[in-house]
Image (spheres, rainbow, N blue to C red):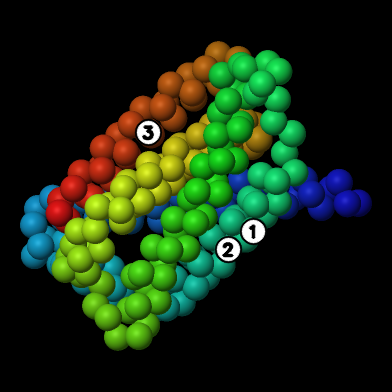
Amino acid sequence: MAGNREFLNRRLHSLLGVIPVGLFLVQHLVINHFATGGEESFNKAAGFMGNLPFRIFLEIFIIFLPLLFHAIYGLYIAFTAKNNVSKFGFFRNWMFMLQRVSGVITLIFVAWHVWETRIQAAFGAEVNFQMMENILSNPFMFWFYLVGVVSTIFHFSNGLWSFCVSWGITLSPRSQLISTYVTIVIFILLSIVGIRALTAFI
């Protein structure tokens, strides 16, 4: 019974990491990338997202609750996982370990980012270009965000590979090899989008 519950929890954890959390990440990166078009371009895109109907409902039930479950159960997985990188050193063993490490980094980064933006917005601050410009003008915060963004994108991209395996989408060695290349391309492309957005704010 306990094994069956853990199996279901891991499936739910995997699913929520892609839908809706992963999709929200991609959408968030796209919105931030509007900063490359200037302050007005970003503020218009951010304003559109901020004025969506039922925004509070969507944020709670489509973003924060799924993210909270994924984060808490992810910590359980990270600290109970048996990494064997030092013994075997295979590529997938390294990806397994990095998935856990990037998950912890991502959790720290996302928690801080939510504090600096959404929580401050609840106290009356406006989430706009100037807010991000002020945050990222600090060199330490810029590098913190850079590491956090890249770590988050890696966690999502590599998690896609695991998702496809655990949900029976890629079962053969060939399909898993192809998905490895696909997820590497996704990681590179999304990292370019994320890094360009960060540099646009400064």
Please tell me which residue is depicted at 49% across the width and 23% down the height of the picture: 180
Judge by depth and name the residue closer to the eye, 134 or 60.
Answer: 134
Above or below for 137 versus 49? above
Q: Amino acid at mark 2?
A: Leu
Above or below for 97 versus 110? above
The image shows residue 12 at horizontal and vertical percentages of: 66, 52
Secondary structure beneath label 3? helix
Q: Give me the C-alpha separation between circle 2 and circle 1.
A: 6 Å
- The residue singled out by tag 2 in the image is 68
From the viewer's perspective, tell me whether residue 1 is left or right of residue 169. Answer: right
Q: Quadrant of the C terminus?
A: bottom left
Instruction: State the image quarter where residue 137 is shown.
Output: bottom left
Q: Earlier in the sequence, mark 1 or mark 3?
A: 1
Above or below for 142 versus 114? above
Q: Earlier in the sequence, mark 2 or mark 3?
A: 2
Q: Amino acid at mark 3?
A: Ile
- The residue singled out by tag 1 in the image is 72
> Quick one: label 2, few (<14), some, or many (20+) residues within 10 Å?
some
Secondary structure beneath label 1? helix
